[in-house]
Image: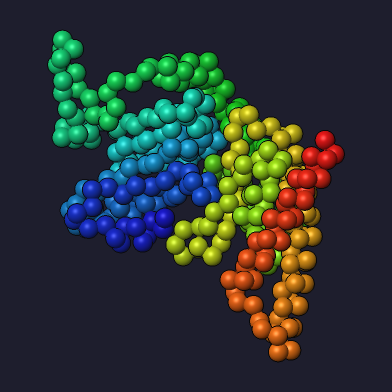
Amino acid sequence: MDPVQAVELVDENTICVAAILGSTLNGEFEDVKLLNDLLLEKNKETGWDTPIHVDAASGGFIAPFLYPELEWDFRLPLVKSINVSGHKYGLVYAGIGWVIWRSKVDLPEELIFHINYLGADQPTFTLNFSKGSSQIIAQYYQLIRLGQEGYRNVMENCRENAMVLKEGLEKTGHFNIVSKDDGVPLVAFSLKDNSRHDEFEISEMLRRFGWIVPAYTMPADAQHITVLRVVIREDFSRTLAERLVIDITKVIHELDALPAKVKAKMSASQENGRNGVVKKTEMETTREITEAWKKFVLARKTNKNTIC
C-alpha cells in the first residue's frame, strides 16, 4: 500500500485504514509510521477521526524482536487496534489468533453482545463462542517458556536462514529476488528468463523432491510478475535451505532439457506452415507442448521406479 494514495482515498465514510505488517505476497512491512503522520494531518484539516488498524498477522511476532525501533504499534496515536496470528510466528498450533485494542473505548459497544445463561453476565465479541482452550494454553506456555530473549533468538535464526536461501538462489544466476531483507523472513523470487519454462513448472517439479513451494502472480499493476515463495519458519534449518537450493538447481537443469525438444517441434511446424503445409493452431500447439511435458514427467517417474 502507498500511504499517500491511501490517505487521498479517505473520506467521511472511512471507518479505518488497515495497514499490513508482513504482506502475504512478499513479506514486506507497510509504512505504518508514514500512514499515521499523513492521516494525522488529514484528520486535523477535515475534523475527522479516522483511525488505523494494523494487520500484523505475521509481523506482530517478528517486528518486536527483530526491529524493536520500528514504530508500527500503539506508539503511534492513530493505531487503535492490532491483530496477530499465534499460529504463524507465535509458534502455536494452527487456529489461534489475537486482536488487541489501545483502550476499552476503542472497542465499540455495538460489537459486544452479552449473555447470562451461564449464571452471570458474560460479554463477548467473537464469532466463535464455544471453543477449546488448548491453543490459548499453548500460546501462554510459549510466551513464558521462551520469553523475549527466546523469541528474539528464534526470529534471528529464521532471518539468517532466509539470507542463506536468498544468497544461494542468487548464486544460481537464474532468479531475481522480489522480497526485501527487512520484513517477514521469507524469500520470494522469480525467473530472470521465463521464455523456456516458468515458475509454475518449477513449483510442480519441486514436489518430486518433497517441496511444496507456491507459485503465484502478483496483484494488480504487477500481475505480469510471477513469483515463488518460501516462508522460513522455526523448523526450517540452514541445512534445509541449502538442500532446497540444490533441488531447485536440479529442477532448472531438467526443465532446460525439455523446452528445447518442444521448441524444435514448434519451429518445424512453423517451417511447414511457410512451405504450404497447414499450420497448427495455437490450441493444437499448446496441446502438443502439454503432451510432450506429460511424457517427459512420466518417463522420469518410470526411470525412478526402475532404479528403485
Quadrant location of the C terminus in the rendered image: top right
Q: Is residue 167 above or below residue 93?
A: below
Name the residue located 39 percent from the left edge and 41 percent from the top edge: 55
Q: Residue furthest top?
A: 119
Name the quarter where the N terminus is drawn. bottom left
- The structure's colour scheme is rainbow
Position of residue 234 relative to residue 295, above or below, is above
Please give the name of the residue rendered at 65% of the width and 55% of the height, measured from the top-left corner: 201
Tell me residue 264's x, y (percent): 77, 72
The extreme right residue here reads 307
The foreground one among 89 and 283 is 283
Q: Residue at x 50, y 62 (%)?
A: 223
Along the line of sight, the residue nearer the viewer: 220 or 77: 220
**Residue 79 image point, x, y percent:** 32, 41
Asked if one can make out residue 181 in the rendered structure from this viewpoint, the answer is: no
Q: Nearer the viewer, residue 46 or 210?
A: 210
Q: Dividing the picture into quarters, in which one does residue 105 lie?
A: top left
Could you say where residue 86 lies in the image, as x and y percent from the top left? 45, 28
Out of 196 and 162, give the one closest to the viewer.
196
Q: Quadrant of residue 3?
A: bottom left
Whether residue 260 appears in this view of the structure is: yes
Figure label count: 0
Residue in the image at 24% along x and 29% along y: 125
* Left or right of 234 in this view: 205: right
Whether residue 38 is situated above or below residue 134 in the rendered picture? below
The image quadrant that residue 234 belongs to is: top right
The percent coordinates of residue 76 (x first, y second) are 35, 41
